[in-house]
Image: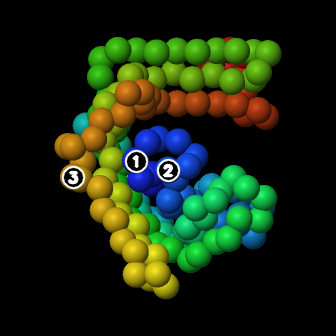
Amino acid sequence: MTLFRGQLAPAGQVHDFHPPVGRCGLYWTVPVPEGGLTFSDGGKTAVLQLKGVEVIDQPMWPKFEAKTTPARMDIRIIWKATDRKVSYNDPQKQFRMDGFMAVSHLEAAVEVPSIGFSWKSGPPGSSKAKFAIIGDEVNGKYYNPAPGA
């Protein structure tokens, strides 16, 4: 998550929060604890809720070796599928997705204790993503040209 002061431009970037590179070498990933992701309404609604995720604040990212400061993040994302079905299958790229367009809302809070900074978004109803899909995806070695094969 990136916070800007003024214009949405590199010069206005004041914070950039993301997980550090993990021990396994993955970037921008965090483990989801038991119960952190729930589904309801027959799989048409999903809620991801994470509290106290250890992240870093790296305001000068993506500059090489930009300074980092330890931070924490709480996040709650709600996806609600619509009735609009979407499918995509690309054998060349070994990628297939089947699902439904969705409405997505986000609530987030961050804290950088060492500099006394904290920020909290509005409640989930105050934000809305322009694009979201809830469904199934397969890729790479799990890809099969014919679904269900």
As helix, strand or loop, the secondary structure at mark 2 comes to helix
CA–CA distance between discs 3 and 1? 22 Å
Residue identifier under label 1: 6
User: Relative to 20, is 117 above or below?
Assistant: below
Q: Amino acid at mark 1?
A: Gly
Left/right of residue 135 with respect to residue 11 in the rendered view: left
As helix, strand or loop, the secondary structure at mark 3 comes to loop
Q: Residue at x 53, y 42 (%)?
A: 9
Front-most of residues 40 and 51:
51
User: Relative to 30, is 80 above or below?
Assistant: above
The quadrant of the rendering that contains the C terminus is top right
CA–CA distance between discs 3 and 2? 24 Å
User: Relative to 91, is 77 above or below?
Assistant: below
Front-most of residues 65 and 82:
65
Residue identifier under label 3: 123
Q: Are marks 3 and 1 in contact (CB under 8 Å)?
A: no
Q: Are marks 2 and 1 in contact (CB under 8 Å)?
A: yes
Camera-near label (3 vs 1) is: 1
Q: How many callouts does the rendering have?
A: 3
Q: Residue furthest bottom?
A: 114
Residue 120: percent from left, percent from top = 30, 62
Q: Amino acid at mark 3?
A: Pro
Q: Amino acid at mark 2?
A: Gly
Can the viewer see residue 37? Answer: no
Residue identifier under label 2: 12
**Residue density around tag 3, few if under 14, some if 14–19, many if 20 or more, within 10 Å:** few
Q: Earlier in the sequence, mark 3 or mark 1?
A: 1
Q: Earlier in the sequence, mark 3 or mark 2?
A: 2
As helix, strand or loop, the secondary structure at mark 1 comes to loop
